[in-house]
């Protein structure tokens, strides 16, 4: 199952798609986001769908400045905003779904940034 989600990061709205497993939870949870100008309909959406079929709740996001998310200028590669977006996505997901804390994390498809919701 896929649900459209929106949450604020600063003054901008980040848009994502939440992929849920068909089985009852609790589920581990992941946030996936692509490199550079990638958007949620590309590789991260494919990964999110595949991981959901394996029992994870997965949020695929468009970083600010890209896709459906807010942020100006458009198509602007700003690493600090991407890190903030991932942190906000993990926070949103942990509040919305109450995932299994020991199985929750954020990752990019290039695996350059990871953070755990268990601080």
Image: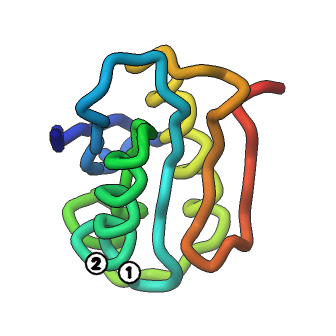
Residue 13 image offset from top left, x and y in percent = 31, 45
Q: Residue at x 34, y 62 (%)?
A: 62
78 relative position to 60: left or right: right
- Residue 78 vs residue 115, the one in the foreground: 115
Q: Residue at x 73, y 55 (%)?
A: 114
Looking at the rendered image, the quarter that the C terminus falls into is: top right
Q: Residue at x 41, y 19 (%)?
A: 97
- Residue 36 vs residue 2, the one in the foreground: 2
* Mark 1 neighbour density, 10 Å: few (under 14) some (14–19) many (20 or more): some
Q: Which residue in the protein does label 2 denote?
A: 42
Instruction: Please tell me whether mark 2 sits on a helix, a strand or a loop.
Output: loop
Q: Residue at x 58, y 67 (%)?
A: 108
Gap between marks 1 and 2 measured at Cα: 7 Å
| Picture disc at residue 38 | 1
Residue 75, by quadrant, is bottom left
Instruction: Please tell me whether mark 1 sits on a helix, a strand or a loop.
Output: loop
41 relative position to 63: left or right: left
Q: Quick check: 82 above or below 85?
A: below
Q: Quick check: 74 above or below 4?
A: below
| Picture disc at residue 79 | none
Residue 71, by quadrant, is bottom left
């Amino acid at each position: 199952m896929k649900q459209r989600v929106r949450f604020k990061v600063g003054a901008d709205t980040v848009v994502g798609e939440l992929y849920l497993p068909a089985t009852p939870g609790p589920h581990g949870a992941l946030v996936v986001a692509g490199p550079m100008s990638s958007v949620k309909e590309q590789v991260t959406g494919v990964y999110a769908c595949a991981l959901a079929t394996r029992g994870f709740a997965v949020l695929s996001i468009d970083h600010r400045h890209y896709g459906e998310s807010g942020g100006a200028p458009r198509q602007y590669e700003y690493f600090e905003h991407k890190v903030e977006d991932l942190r906000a996505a993990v926070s949103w997901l942990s509040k919305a779904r109450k995932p299994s804390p020991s199985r929750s994390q954020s990752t990019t498809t290039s695996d350059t940034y990871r953070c755990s919701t268990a601080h």
